[in-house]
Image (cartoon, rainbow, N blue to C red):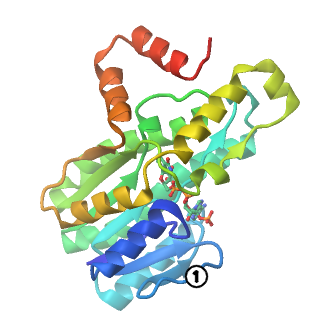
């Protein structure tokens, strides 16, 4: 199959590009910087903030291959810190990369997938797209946006036989933690003394999280499936449990559990 993956310089993108190319798929992956190239993978240089560049890249793939089967919208980043202290530029970068990046990719692949009457759009959300994570509020907001957008999109494109699948990983050990843009100014730390321990807990959990190959294997399975579900949580047992509790418990109870987990009181 012809697969287009955004953000293959590290983490999920890198593992997925590696695995899918080994499995014989034709993989086109995007990067923004110099990387050690994987054999068999075709590299495209672009930033997902640039809608025009994304469209040109996808059109180029279709011109060469005749069609495009799968979009894996993976590129993403996170900002950490008290919501109150995030700057407008940081918020725009967060929503621009994670949400508008997806919109750019979907807008680029859909005309081709509609024409073909087939295609799969796999979007990386997060467990943070199902619950508002303290001190990762704008990250959560960007993933909630993805959830709402994909829910609507899957209904709109169903008749065109395009399938939308949302992936919600829990904690994984990737480049994500190191790339997080953290609000670290004195004023923020003074106003929210609980922020420091909460973000340390987040980083500790991510560093000890699952290996990205677990998610790459899930993506590989979804690509093969005729009728994948609309969404999957890919996480440890405890994190899957937290998603279930969020769904079934009264909001007040769940907030108490989350607050105590992050030592917010
Ligand atoms: N790791 C986790 O625990 C976790 C959990 C839930 C969801 N996720 C989601 O999984 C996805 C992949 O993250 P990861 O964990 O694999 O992190 P990662 O190792 O930091 O990889 C992120 C990738 O996205 C690329 N990227 C970032 N901004 C971009 C932009 N504006 N344009 C193009 N590429 C861009 C990065 O490229 P550069 O190298 O150039 O920065 C990198 O290739 C993200 O959407 C993230 O939100 C991760």
* Residue 108 shows up from this direction: no
Residue at 38%, 41% (x, y): give it.
147
Q: Which residue is farthest front?
A: 208
Q: Which residue is farthest bottom?
A: 64
Q: Quadrant of the C terminus?
A: top right
> Foreground: 77 or 257?
257
Task: Give the quarter of the image for residue 131.
Answer: top left
Side of 101 relative to 24 (left or right): right
The relative height of residue 134 versus residue 97 in the rendered view (above or below) is above
Q: Which residue is mark 1?
A: 36
> Foreground: 262 or 145?
262
Are there few (<14), some (14-19), or many (20+) residues within 10 Å of tag 1?
A: few
**Which percent across, then down, holds residue 72?**
38, 63
> Foreground: 114 or 211?
211
- Indicate which quadrant contains ligand 1: bottom right
Side of 159 relative to 126 (left or right): left
* Residue 165 shows up from this direction: yes
Residue at 36%, 62% (x, y): give it.
216
Q: Which residue is farthest right?
A: 186
**Which percent across, then down, holds residue 251?**
40, 13
**Which percent across, then down, holds residue 128?**
47, 36
Task: Give the quarter of the image for residue 113.
Answer: bottom left
Task: Give the quarter of the image for residue 129.
Answer: top left
Residue at 33%, 49% (x, y): give it.
166
Q: Quadrant of the N terminus?
A: bottom left
Q: Secondary structure at mark 1?
A: loop
Q: Is mark 1 within 8 Å of ligand 1?
A: no
**Which percent across, then down, holds residue 23?**
27, 78
Q: Which residue is farthest left?
A: 226
């Amino acid at each position: 199959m012809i697969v287009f993956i955004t953000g293959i310089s590290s983490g999920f993108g890198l593992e997925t590009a590696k695995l899918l190319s080994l499995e014989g798929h034709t993989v086109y992956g995007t990067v923004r910087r110099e990387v050690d190239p994987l054999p068999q993978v075709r590299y495209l240089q672009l930033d997902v903030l640039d809608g025009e560049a994304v469209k040109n890249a996808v059109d180029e793939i279709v011109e060469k291959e005749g069609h495009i089967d799968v979009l894996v919208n993976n590129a993403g980043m996170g900002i950490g810190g008290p919501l109150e202290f995030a700057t407008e530029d940081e918020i725009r970068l967060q929503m621009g990369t994670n949400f508008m990046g997806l919109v750019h990719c979907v807008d680029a692949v859909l005309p081709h997938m509609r024409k073909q009457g087939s295609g799969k759009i796999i979007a990386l959300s997060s467990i943070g797209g199902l619950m508002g994570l303290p001190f990762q509020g704008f990250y959560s907001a960007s993933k909630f946006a993805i959830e709402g957008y994909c829910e609507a999109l899957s209904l709109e494109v169903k008749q065109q036989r395009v399938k939308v699948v949302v992936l919600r990983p829990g904690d994984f050990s990737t480049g994500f933690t190191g790339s997080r843009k953290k609000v670290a100014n004195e004023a923020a730390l003074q106003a929210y003394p609980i922020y420091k321990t909460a973000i340390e807990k987040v980083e500790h959990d991510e560093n000890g999280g699952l290996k990205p190959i677990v998610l790459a294997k899930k993506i590989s399975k979804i690509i093969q499936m005729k009728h994948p579900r609309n969404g999957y949580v890919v996480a440890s047992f405890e994190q899957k449990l937290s998603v279930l509790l969020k769904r079934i418990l009264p909001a007040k109870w769940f907030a108490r559990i989350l607050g105590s987990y992050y030592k917010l009181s």
